[in-house]
Image: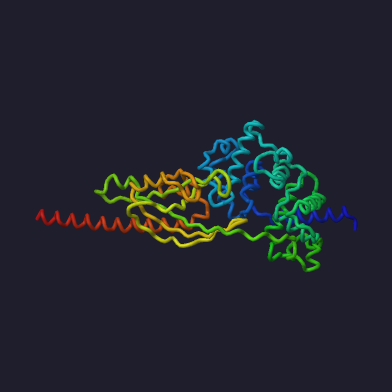
Amino acid sequence: MNPTYIKEQFIQNLLIWYERNKRELAFRKDKNPYRIWISEIMAQQTRIETMIPYFERFIQKYPDVKSLSQADDDELMAMWQGLGYYSRARSLKKAAIMIMEEYDGVFPLKKEELKKLPGIGDYTAGAIASIAGRQKASAIDGNVIRVFSRLFEFGEDPGKASGKKQMTALVEAFLPEADLCGDFNQALMEIGALVCLPKSPSCSFCPLEKFCLSRKSGKQLEYPMKSIKKPRTIENREIWVIARESMENKKDHSHVSRASYDIKIQKRSEKGLLSGLFEFGEQKPQGKEYRVFDLGSYIHIFSHKEWHMNAKLAVISYEDSERLCQQTDSLQKKPDHAQFVPMDDIASVYALPTAFMPFFNRARKILNDQVNMNQSDSMTIQTIGLENEKDEFK
């Protein structure tokens, strides 16, 4: 059969299917390069359905390159909280600054220019160039790799340099003319996301079924080929969530009000895992007296390591909290630059990685329960006081 005819049929089947079945996503509507960029970076390691609310909040706060370039670092990290891989957010700001300084705020659209920006690799550059710039460029993500690996029973590991090079050449051999490349790339991604699923491909619904070699051989689940990964390393950690009664509560105990707590957090190193984010320390509090609550255990899995964590909540006095901020953290081996912040500000103002959220949520419930108990006792005392006043008045 004529190879040119096969390519034309391949492209036609794919684009017709895409037009009928594509998801209506906010970042696809106007082909704005900034919005496409943010969505593509967010979609890395995150499902589209999960990413969309984050995308909408992010765009509302940072609607353009200029606003992102001026973002406060801590606020930016808080906006990114829940998506993980926080280096992506830092790279976004660096790239935005570069666009403002070197491109006069005009988003570049050529693939090679885009790849010069921090955090933008071959895939993201190809997506922006083809969708927003209407250029002939491939955009090869995990979905596209899976689709083409199964279509042609690709016998190399696409995660290795040699396999990646061959995969790129294979995909680019099927690219249509420039005006259609954006839809072509998005169609392949949609096939991978909706039809050619990792463990349960819906082959009978695939517009490329007749071209698929692994469908004919029944070996769909054997592709893409992957090398055996090294086992993740395990790190055991003891976490201390340290709370103190808010200073506002110490000013006046004569009336019933909504009491609250401050929580000790510290900033991680600017290098390494979860760099620049906030965390709870591993230093046991050194005070005269404090209450301790068990927060249980939790395992957080990263791509290359696992944290096996046990945590406790310590409620200390305000005086002890002042001394605690001067201690040296046992993990960081240096002053931990700790600070006590309002409990309600954690997660909204201060970016706390997902790894610590189970402990924070458990601690917050315990502390809120303590507040409710104290308020109930205070109400009882005030009621008794009023009854005594009535008796005296009689």
The x, y position of residue 109, in whole percent, is 71, 39
- Judge from the rendering whether residue 262 lies leftward or rightward of residue 97; answer left or right: left
Instruction: Please state which of residues 7 and 337 is positioned toward the viewer in this rendering.
Output: 337
Please name the residue shown 12% across and 57% down the image. Answer: 391
386 with respect to 10 (left or right) = left
In front here: 180 or 256?
A: 256
Numbered-mark total: 0
Q: Residue furthest bottom?
A: 218
Give whichever of 326, 190 is nearer the camera: 326
Residue 368 visible here: yes
Residue 43, horizontal then vertical, whole percent: 63, 51
In front of the other: 386 or 296: 296
Q: Is residue 27 left or right of residue 340?
A: right
Residue 38, above or below 5:
above
Q: Quadrant of the C terminus?
A: bottom left
Q: Judge left or right: residue 364 versus residue 136.
A: left
| Residue 387 vertical position relative to residue 204 in the rendered view, above or below | above
Return the x and y of residue 311 as percentages of the image width and height. Answer: 45, 58
Q: Is residue 78 visible?
A: no
Residue depicted at x 55% and y 46%: 275
Corner quadrant of residue 381 = bottom left
Residue furthest toward the left?
A: 394
Q: Quadrant of residue 49?
A: bottom right
Q: Is residue 191 above or below residue 129?
A: below
* Quadrant of the frame with the N terminus: bottom right
Q: Quadrant of residue 305?
A: bottom right
Coloring basis for residues: rainbow
Image position, residue 312 (x, y; %): 43, 58
